[in-house]
Amino acid sequence: MTKSIKRIVIGLSALLFVIYFTACTNEQADNNISEISAMDTLAMTPPMGWNSWNPFGTGVSEMVIRETADAIVSSGLKDVGFEYIVMDDFWHGGRDSVTGLLYADPEKFPSGIKALSDYVHSKGLKLGIYSDAGTMTCGQMPGSYGYEVEDAQLFADWGIDYLKYDYCFCPDYVSWNNDYRMAIDRYKAMGDALKATGRPIVYSVCEWGPRSPWLWGKEVGAHLWRTSYDVADIWESPRNETSPIGILTAIDATANLGRFVTKGGWNDPDMLVVGLNNTGFIKGGGCNDIEYQSQMSMWCMLSAPLMIGCDVRDMNEATKTILLNKEIIAINQDELGKQGFRVMHKDGIDAWKKPLSGNRVAIAFLNRNSKDEKVTASWEQLELDPETRYDAYDVWEHAAVEHSEGSLSTDLQPHETKVFVLTIE
Ligand code: GAL
């Protein structure tokens, strides 16, 4: 080979290498982009939906899920944003000893989960499922420990859009020594497995809070993480101790965690008990409609996921009024994605503030007391600029409210929450 031919051959090889290398790098970049877009752009506002646990517990079934999907559409809940229908514990039949695959209870789910997800999707809704990072779920059904990859793929193949992942039957769950590292590893194993399926699946960590999941939730790929034990149908419980706790107790457990919230990573003080009226699976004594309205108000102020926990096939008017209020939901879903924080906590009255897009701010007054109260808060107390003039709008009355310059006043019934949107005049 002459020198010049050699040069041409070397030059061509180098060119081919560069073309090949660039193609590989682009492919990798594309893969990365698709990975990012599949999971990381999910739940940019707090997820909204329904979960079977509070109303049905062990009685979840295909019929319940289908009828719930129908009711979410016919009641208008879909139109205001409720989207995910989540089957909680007790959907399981078992784990096949030969294939190692989970299967649904054939009596409760005669058509199987794939057919069910097709049905839910045909209604323009999404389907969620429940599993556990330990060997068994809290209801002692098979857990996903050691089967993370297989279960994530099965859920994806079934067309699942949301996974609630519990923490019963992990070794430190039994010993109560709160091993953070173990929790992170187990939740990351499932987070990675979900990501590897390529299907966008909202990932909900249900560790209840003792291992501070707000510190590592994003790291394991989660979009939301529980900050409290289970909320029962009661207003208040003594402390954030193991279930059940009250609405007010869950609010307090989440109050100071706002700095960990990002768009796509939300604090989850558990599901709504609105409309349960001491029926269903989880009881507690029942709340009144003022208390249910307070839960909805405060979950919206906290940018909490809004997972309905009552039987939506049979809602009374008060429940519908609470759950279908677009104006309070708009506060929850506001594009700024900021969790509200407490600016006043005095004599049993809380004032909360949540920055909203468009230079607006939501203010909530919560009466923790069991008697009527009158509250007046100045712009200074609400940490607002004292010189600014605001229009105030009451999102439960659906009306503008008059107020004196530089302050806002309102009357509150026992356990009532009122929410106002302030807009610069
Ligand atoms: C609990 C969880 C509840 C529900 C229940 C099912 O650990 O906090 O929300 O999922 O398990 O057994």
Image (tube, rainbow, N blue to C red):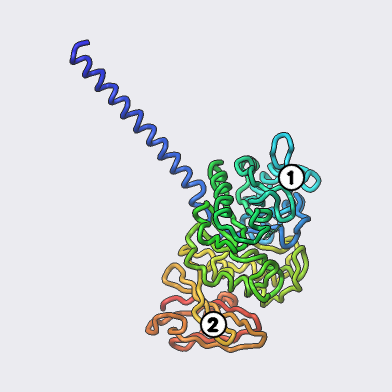
Around disc 1, counting alpha carbons within 10 Å, would you say few (fewer than 14), some (14 to 19), or many (20 or more)?
Answer: some
Percent across and percent down for residue 137 are 70, 52
Is residue 205 left or right of 110 when viewed as pictured? left
Question: Which amino acid type corresponds to the residue marked 2 in the rendered image?
Answer: His
Read off the residue under disc 2.
Answer: 345
Given the current orientation, which residue lies at the most extreme right position?
Answer: 107
- Label at residue 104: 1
In the foreground, 136 or 402: 136
- Label at residue 330: none
74 w.r.t. 118: above or below: below
Q: Secondary structure at mark 2?
A: strand
Q: Are marks 1 and 2 in contact (CB under 8 Å)?
A: no
Percent across and percent down for residue 20 are 35, 28
61 w.r.t. 256: above or below: above
Quarter residue 75 falls in: bottom right
Whether disc 1's CB lies below 8 Å from ligand 1 is answered no
Percent across and percent down for residue 371 are 66, 87
Quarter residue 305 falls in: bottom right
For the point 53% across and 80% down, the residue is: 351
- Ligand 1 quadrant assignment: bottom right
Query: What is the spatial separation of the Cα atoms under label 1 and label 2, in whole angstroms?
Result: 48 Å
Q: Secondary structure at mark 1?
A: strand
Q: Quadrant of the N terminus?
A: top left
For the point 22% across and 16% down, the residue is: 6
